[in-house]
Amino acid sequence: MDETVAEFIRRTILKIPMNEMMTILKAWDFLSENQLQTINFRQRKECLVQDLVGLCEEKSASVNDAALLDIICKF
């Protein structure tokens, strides 16, 4: 995954309120339910974002995937 895409995903996730995080990530449907269950949503947001970006890197997220997350966050 391109470093620019990783940074875009990181910044987008940081904008998501914690109480809406799981709902938005499920609506995005890029990460599987099993992957989401491996994430500790009770940790500091910066650490959470690092974990989520790591999963996105493993799945080779594209610019289109990142853009879709950004669009979902705006609704």
Image: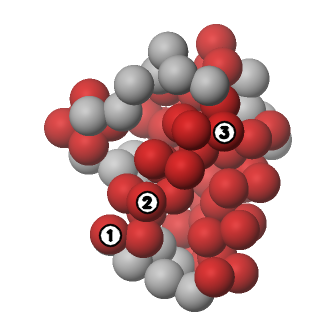
CA–CA distance in space, label 3 to label 1 = 19 Å
Q: Which mark is residue 58?
A: 1
Which of the two labelled residues, at mark 3 and mark 2, occupies the earlier sequence position?
3
Residue that label 2 marks: 54
Residue at 77 percent across and 54 percent down: it is 11
Which of the two labelled residues, at mark 3 and mark 1, occupies the earlier sequence position?
3
Q: How crowded is the residue under tag 2: few (<14 C-alpha within 10 Å), some, or many (20+)?
A: some
Residue type indicated by callout 2: Gly
Q: Circle 1 sits in a helix, a strand or a loop, which is it? A: helix
Q: Is residue 25 left or right of residue 74?
A: left
Residue at 54 percent across and 50 percent down: it is 50
Which coloring applies here?
Answer: secondary structure
Q: In this view, does 66 lie to the left or right of 30?
A: right
Residue that label 3 marks: 46
Of residue 27 and residue 15, the one placed in the foreground of this image is 15
In this rendering, the answer to whether 22 lies above or below 5 is above
Residue type indicated by callout 1: Glu
Of residue 70 and residue 9, the one placed in the foreground of this image is 9
x and y, in percent, of residue 51 in the image: 45, 47
In this rendering, the answer to whether 63 lies above or below 39 is below
Of residue 51 and residue 16, the one placed in the foreground of this image is 51
Residue at 26 percent across and 29 percent down: it is 37
Residue type indicated by callout 3: Glu
x and y, in percent, of residue 39 in the image: 36, 33
Quarter of the view holding residue 35: top left
